Image: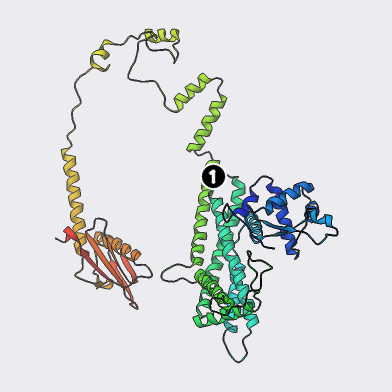
Amino acid sequence: MTETVEQPNGAYAPFAYATAPNSALYRRIMHTFVRAKERFTVHLRPEDIRSALEDDGGISVTDAAVAAALDSLAAPTWGNLVAFPDSSRVTAIEDFYRRRMLYQLSHAGEAAERALRQFDDSLGARGALQAVALEDIAILLRSLVSLGKPGEQPIDEARIHQDLRSLRDRFTELADNAVLFMGSVQRSIDLQAADLDAFLAYKDSLIGYLERFIADLVTRGAQISALLRRFSSHDVQRLCTIAARREAQDAAPGLISAGASLEAPPVPERTDASVPDPLADLTVMWLRRWEGLTDWFVATPARESEAKLLRARARSAIPALLAVVATLHDRHSGRSDRSADFLTLASWFSALPDDEARHRLWRGAFGLAPARHLSTNPETEEAWEHARVGPSTQWAESPGMQISSQLRRTGTYERRGRQNRVTDRTGAKALLADRAREQSEQTAAARRRILTDGPVRLSTFAVLDRQSFHLFLALLGDGLAALRPDLDHAEIYTSDGGLRLTITRLPGAPPMRLETVDGALSGPDHLVDIGLVGLAAV
């Protein structure tokens, strides 16, 4: 029987049954096929499926509903099932004219159902930081160190293969669970409202859990990194080849392709170089797994290890959790913020008796007061109060207003008089200018005192005054920050671009000590060059 699946909707057409109408029945039927295949039952009849659906305790379905669902799943549009005539129970000529079908999972249908089951399992999964997995990885690496070295005893390839498989499983579990756990911690940090007592109890246990794992990761991570460095590239190649060779022995022969006919003559065995080599493919796969393990624990000058990034992320989660606790405390204690103000205002609105009172509250809360540039006399206000002019009344039909003639002539009610005298700020401006000039001269003098005529050692600097030393210390701090672990040389500039600092590492240099007016500065010695740049050098 030829298995041909047309997919006009693309490669993801087998997933369409998960969102189609009657998807619950489709999922139950596909789950029945997967469970049957796990018991090595490949073909199912409609009555077998109906019986299995009744046994699973779900909603009962009719034979017609099962038949219609099987036809939809086996249709070329979806291609989750493969259907072909059932001739095994034909006993008369009339049976050939009856529609009897056998169904089996297609490759795409099985992959889609298993992917959906994995999706369902992942939704409820909660990760964990597994300190025990770190210990297991270290134990397995020590075992591989002893087993992988040729000696008087023959190499135990079965034990090496078993240890590598265990190492792969424990590392995969550790990495996946760490990602899930940190994601759940971040969701807890991002919450905006929670029961204070419950979150405080959760916070205490979580912080203790993070601190224990960080301590284990620091110690175990260093041990694992040291063990991984003991394996040379030749050792890794030999171990991966052993594992690949043992797995290649169990590799299944090539299966008939999905579009091939079972009645077609057998394809002659090919011996050219285009035939895939299982041993080579498996060796490359194991080498990639070992590379992933190494990248997770061993840092290089070009990148940080995943273990170090996880440690930093776990450490940063602790102050973030404490910040959430502080926010919850503030809300619990009634500290005013915008959300609390709006909630209080909403409670006031709900307690008011009518819309007129609510409008007054609205105007008072949001500053919607009437215009203040126009005022009237008491008689006009009384007339307007009796007129009860509504907001929809046209201005031409509304009663007039009496305004002051002073407002008409000058545009203001205030009488003009003698203006206030202008304050003379000449002395204050001169004082500020003198202070600015004095500070500029002091800064320029401090810059001149720390200049060098070329590269010099830090240990050769003389005693500096307080202002010069503060400038020198700030410049040195920026230079050391720019000198990353993978660099031996760095160059930085001040914010105004007037000074340039060039700093260089001195491998093996003894520690230096600088005496200042405020104390002594000690640390590793470096080669520095401080000079003026641009207009400052003129």
Provide the residue designation for mark 1: 192
Quadrant occupied by the N terminus: bottom right
- Report helix, strand or loop for mark 1: loop
Q: Position of residue 219 (x, y in %)?
A: 54, 71
Up-down: is 443 above or below 375? Answer: below
Up-down: is 433 above or below 88? Answer: above
Q: Where on the picture, by quarter, is residue 408?
A: top left
Amino acid type indicated by mark 1: Gln
Q: Can residue 232 be seen at all in this image of the molecule?
A: no
Residue farthest along the bottom direction in this orientation: 152
Q: Position of residue 530 (x, y in %)?
A: 23, 66
Q: Can residue 466 be seen at all in this image of the molecule?
A: yes
Q: Residue at x 54, y 51 (%)?
A: 189
Q: Residue at x 83, y 54 (%)?
A: 94
Q: Residue at x 19, y 32 (%)?
A: 423
Up-down: is 188 above or below 405? Answer: below
94 vs 531, nearest the viewer: 94
Relative side of 406 to 221, left or right? left
4 vs 305, nearest the viewer: 4
Relative side of 207 to 54, left or right? left
3 vs 169, nearest the viewer: 3
Residue farthest along the front direction in this orientation: 93
504 vs 173, nearest the viewer: 173
Q: Position of residue 12 (x, y in %)?
A: 59, 55
Q: Where on the picture, by quarter, is residue 429?
A: top left
Relative side of 398 to 230, left or right? left
Q: Position of residue 414 (x, y in %)?
A: 26, 18
